[in-house]
Image (cartoon, helix red, strand yellow):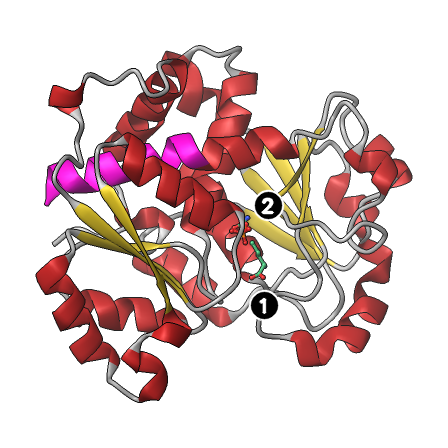
Amino acid sequence: MRHFIKETDFTHAEIKHVFASAAAMKAARSATPPSTLPLARQSWGLLFFKKSTRTRVSFQVGVSELGGHPVMLNAEELQLARGETVGDTARVLSRYLHGLVVRCYEHSLLEEIAQFGTVPVINALSDYLHPCQIYADFFTLAERWSNGDPTRFLESLKGRKIAFLGDTACNMANSLILGGALFDVEVALAGPPGYEPHKAIRAQLLRDRLTPTWNFTTDPFEAVRDADMLYTDVWVSMGVEAEKSERLRQMRPYQVNAPLMRTAKPDAYFMHCLPAHVGEEVTQEVLDSPSCIIFDQAENRLHIQKAILAQLSARN
Ligand code: CP
Ligand code: NVA
């Protein structure tokens, strides 16, 4: 059974295909002839343990547009919340559904669902990784850097430099580290001392036999120098709210603002997975600037996830 739990679950050839089919689906949205709808007669469960706007709506719409039926599952409303095991839940849901999209806290829960279930599992964000977001983000950059030529998407990413500011130990930072190695992009991370990327993500690169392309500094200006894109995420991810005041204090020097943007390349883009906390990790001025491409990123979640769903359903 093939799953999409981490960025490296697809081969290079598959990623190329996913990007090309996302571009084709984007160009002909909702125009796929019914006879070729890849999820026809299928029901996909969307199981969420955490809040979501973009991911839940883009998956719900995406499954529908591919001819499938999305089934929204709030973890709090399942017997899981009353102690039923993850294993039994996965076995039972596999008897009804053709696939499961899961947003959770511990990444190991995704692996457990994949182990006990018998349908493909897609990671819709865990505390460790957010692979659908990263594919959408690199797709968004590739569209621009290739001038919209899908045959040049992957090549247009090679050798670029991106900088990530703020919580350099969060799921988005981990996913950028993996994505950077996959797409041959330098990832310069800048965050407070103590927020260096964890051992787990370094071990993941080794397991996937990928050459690391990331580096870490506590100096935000050093990280963004010559960068082609600046990325940030919330300073308080879902699940670490108890650390809020300490994090806001420590991450303050890593806010993406106009002086930091000016230190990057003149045509550098600004990206954020959203939701944004204005005045914390980013200023309104940056969000309002022409370099900000956050809504293209958000839109591309839909197109890339449709391509991921189609790829998984063809492979399983
Ligand atoms: N970027 C992202 O995953 O957004 P949501 O939390 O709204 O799904
Ligand atoms: N790092 C954030 C990403 C939200 C899309 C979180 O996990 O809350």
Badge 1 amino acid? Met
| Cβ of mark 2 under 8 A from ligand 1 | yes
From the viewer's perspective, is residue 219 above or below residue 180? below
Q: Position of residue 73 (x, y in %)?
A: 34, 62
From the viewer's perspective, is residue 1 above or below residue 314? below
Query: Which image quarter is the N terminus in?
Result: bottom left
Answer with left or right where residue 309 lies relative to residue 97.
Answer: right
- Residue nearer the viewer, 92 or 161: 92
At a point 67% along the width and 75% down the height, the residue shown is 241
Q: Position of residue 313 (x, y in %)?
A: 16, 40
Answer with left or right where residue 68 lies relative to residue 201.
Answer: left
Q: Which residues are magenta?
A: 302-316
Give the image quarter of residue 206. bottom left
Q: Return the disc, 1 or 2, that comes first in the chain's sequence.
A: 1
Badge 2 amino acid? Cys
| Cβ of mark 1 under 8 A from ligand 2 | yes
Q: Residue furthest bottom?
A: 83
The residue to which callout 1 is attached is 238
Q: What secondary structure is the stretch in magenta mostly built from? A: helix
Answer with left or right where residue 100 lies relative to residue 36.
Answer: right
Q: Is residue 312 magenta?
A: yes
The residue to which callout 2 is attached is 273
Mark drawn on residue 194: none
Total marks in image: 2
